[in-house]
Image: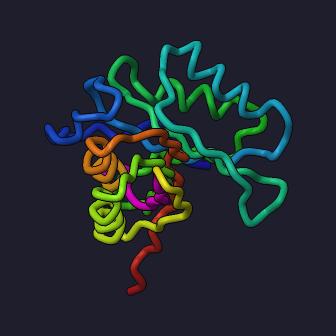
């Protein structure tokens, strides 16, 4: 079982900047839960009752088909996260909770961008895709669809670069994360 609380530490000013505009520590929570109907609804309801907004949410299977991993990002500005994690531990279907620190986790997100791509701007958009190691997954006469995988910051940067060209549509997965391997002695 993971520790229900978070450790107190000095906060760097860069950590206070979050995508949601709230001021507080951004938490990346990884929950191992039983793969059963209603588990996600109970987890989301607990956050809602405590006044937390879930910024991103990704759910998927693990190496064990009976267990799913729920990865969510929340802003801990309005309420302390430790109270919610204590409540999560009380839910029957929650097996393990981890509040992942950025330096001890590998986190990635995937996004699809459909961008206006007139003949005169198509080459520039394709160059952006190349710079960001993105993949062009669909092309039409008027648009290009690009898949970008990486950190949230990388995807935000790509969005800022292509938005002036005319961002038609965007879909993002939310972060998924896994703990880094510990160095062997």
Colour setup of the view: rainbow
Q: Is residue 152 magenta?
A: yes
Magenta span covers which residues? 143-153
Q: Residue at x 31, y 66 (%)?
A: 123
The front one of 169 and 95 is: 169
Main SS type for the magenta part? strand
Instruction: Name the residue rendered at 72%, 25% in the picture.
Output: 42
Taking 80 as reference, is 3 left or right? right
Q: Give the residue at the far left of this rendering.
A: 13
Tell me residue 34's x, y (percent): 79, 45
**Taking the image as drawn, is residue 109 in sight?**
no
Question: Is residue 136 placed above or below 61 in the rendered structure?
Answer: below
* Left or right of 166 on screen, residue 58: right
For the C terminus, give its image quadrant.
bottom left
Relative side of 146 to 26, left or right = right
- From where the camera sits, is residue 162 visible? yes
Return the x and y of residue 159 as percentages of the image width and height.
Answer: 33, 46
Q: Nearer the viewer, residue 162 or 37?
A: 162
Frontmost residue, 105 versus 167? 167
Q: Position of residue 27 (x, y in %)?
A: 41, 39
74 above or below 146?
Answer: above
Q: Residue 45 in the image: state x and y as whole percent.
A: 65, 20
Q: Residue at x 60, y 45 (%)?
A: 58
Residue 49 included in the magenta stretch of the image: no
| Residue at horizontal 48 percent and vertical 20 percent from the top | 52
Which residue is more in the foreground, 152 or 142? Answer: 142
């Amino acid at each position: 079982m993971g520790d229900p609380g978070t450790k107190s530490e000095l906060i760097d000013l860069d950590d206070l900047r979050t995508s949601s505009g709230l001021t507080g520590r951004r938490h990346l929570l990884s929950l191992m839960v039983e793969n059963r109907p209603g588990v996600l609804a109970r987890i989301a309801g607990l956050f809602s009752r405590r006044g937390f907004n879930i910024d991103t949410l990704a759910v998927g299977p693990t190496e064990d088909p009976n267990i799913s991993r729920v990865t969510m990002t929340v802003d801990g500005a309005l309420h302390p996260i430790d109270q919610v994690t204590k409540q999560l531990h009380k839910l029957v279907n929650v097996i393990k909770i981890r509040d992942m620190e950025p330096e001890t986790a590998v986190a990635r997100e995937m996004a699809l961008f459909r961008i206006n791509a007139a003949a005169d701007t198509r080459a520039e958009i394709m160059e952006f895709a190349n710079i960001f190691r993105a993949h062009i997954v669909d092309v039409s006469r008027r648009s290009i669809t690009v898949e970008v995988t990486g950190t949230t910051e990388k995807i935000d940067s790509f969005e800022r670069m292509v938005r002036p060209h005319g961002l038609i549509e965007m879909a993002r997965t939310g972060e998924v994360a896994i703990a880094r391997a510990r160095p062997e002695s």
